[in-house]
Image: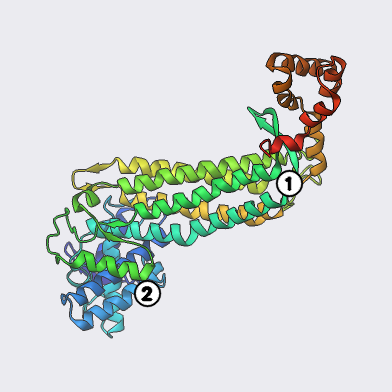
Amino acid sequence: MRTERDSMGEMAVPADALYGASTQRAVLNFPVSGRPMPAAFIRGLGLVKFACARANLELRRLPAEKGRLIEQAAREVADGRLAAHFPVDVFQTGSATSSNTNANEVIANRCSQLAGQPVGSHRPVHPNDDVNLGQSSNDVIPTALHVSLAAVLHAELIPALETLGRELDAKSAAFADIVKIGRTHLMDATPLTLGQEFSGYAAQVHKSVERARSAIAALGELAIGGTAVGTGINGHPEFAGVVCRILCTETGLAFREADNHFEAQAARDDCVEVAGLLVTMAASLTKLANDIRWLASGPRAGLGELRLPATQPGSSIMPGKVNPVMCEMLVQAALYAEGLANTAARCGREGQFELNATLPLLAHCLHEAVHVLSAATRNFAERCVAGLEADPARCRDLVARSLMLVTALSPHLGYDQAAAVAKEAQATGRTLREIVLERKLMDPAALDRALDPRMMTHPGE
């Protein structure tokens, strides 16, 4: 152990830790979940500290030597090289001041190492006066939340969704000529092609990509520059604009200074919007996964229109059983993400006056939801959808047995007479064709054209 000091006095700190006394107090105060703040959030926090240091250099608020040292140390945080030195639990002070202080201390102590000074000496860089110059936890943490979340949406979730979209597009093309029976209310409906059905799934995923982009756009306003309550006290009037420009350059994403700093710090409505978009994406993925496992149910006593790739044994007692494990994985991940997003939305209600006091939990929930959805979506695309096969014979058989082909007879017979034909077919086990011809309701050639399932899938052609 070594001894460090903060505004409350001395504190024993692990000798090999780069954090200081205030962080150690948080470690002792909040032994709650054992979960530190999300790694992606800490990387985003490092990037914000880097941008702040560079802005202070440009604005001549920091000496060149200090500024360069802070930039180097903050870059190491942003690159994940100092992750072991961020131990503060998610369930901590609601402003995440402990995490901001953690970053300030780690960066200052790393600067001491780089300058050949003792760790904990606050030489040549002070954690508050230099690393936190022109900043407050109340504007830094919301800024880091927006930057880090936008970055993972861009780098993880969008690529995963695009991968799934491409796989579904490929299956839609491959299944274009396979006619199958449609289903509404889980009951037989009129025919469509399996390719048409998969085109709908692909469109859902493409819309999810656009929703993820909308989420990034919602995170574009940054609170930095508002300092304690939004007034910008102890800050430089150009600081926020310079920081945003640097963050745009570093991330390739569009960030800008908040239109109203009081809203940007007091409310987390942008994050609630993102949570809602994540719920929508999770619901969409759940529907997709459930449809695929239903269509593949069987293989002999279910629908059996699809064949799932065999990824692992499905049972410890039933030999040869293959289960829709990748579908089940995605459903569970989506349910989990939806729950996290709902918690994030509730966090958005917990702002009082000039500050929301659930920022660490908000960061945890949104980052965890994005991380799990991203990984689950990519695995589902690569280990399930890519290997899906159709059973054309089974599709043909179910179409041939369906009574809902009678829908195409309504224009010829009228709804009531067509319904009577369908009911007699159901009661007797005979075909629609046999009953229509027996009753002499249509010419055989016209009847065959009307009952052609392929024509029903493209009625306008």
**Residue 199 picture location, percent across and down:** 62, 46
Near-viewer residue (409 or 430): 409
Would residue 112 be visible to someone looking at this image? yes
Q: How many marks?
A: 2
Mark 1: secondary structure: loop
**Residue 292 picture location, percent across and down:** 66, 43
Q: Is 398 drawn above or below residue 216 in the view shown?
A: above
Q: Residue at x 80, y 43 (%)?
A: 392
Q: Is residue 267 left or right of residue 186?
A: left
Q: Which mark is residue 69?
A: none
**Residue 295 picture location, percent across and down:** 70, 39
Q: Is residue 47 left or right of residue 35?
A: left
**Residue 55 picture location, percent across and down:** 23, 72
Residue density around tag 2, few if under 14, some if 14–19, many if 20 or more, within 10 Å: some
Residue sticking out furthest to the bottom: 116
Residue density around tag 1, few if under 14, some if 14–19, many if 20 or more, within 10 Å: some
Q: Is 414 drawn above or below residue 63 in the view shown?
A: above
Q: Which mark is residue 76?
A: 2
Say which quadrant the C terminus sits in: top right
Q: Is residue 415 left or right of residue 287?
A: right
First of labels 1, 2 by sequence position: 2
Q: Residue at x 75, y 27 (%)?
A: 405
Mark 2: secondary structure: helix
Q: Are marks 1 and 2 in contact (CB under 8 Å)?
A: no
Q: Residue at x 84, y 18 (%)?
A: 435
Residue 61's image quarter? bottom left
Residue 452's image quarter? top right
Would residue 90 be visible to someone looking at this image? no
Q: How far apart are labels 1 and 2 at the CA level? A: 45 Å
Which residue lies under the disc numbered 1? 314
Kind of residue at disc 2: Glu
Kind of residue at disc 1: Gly
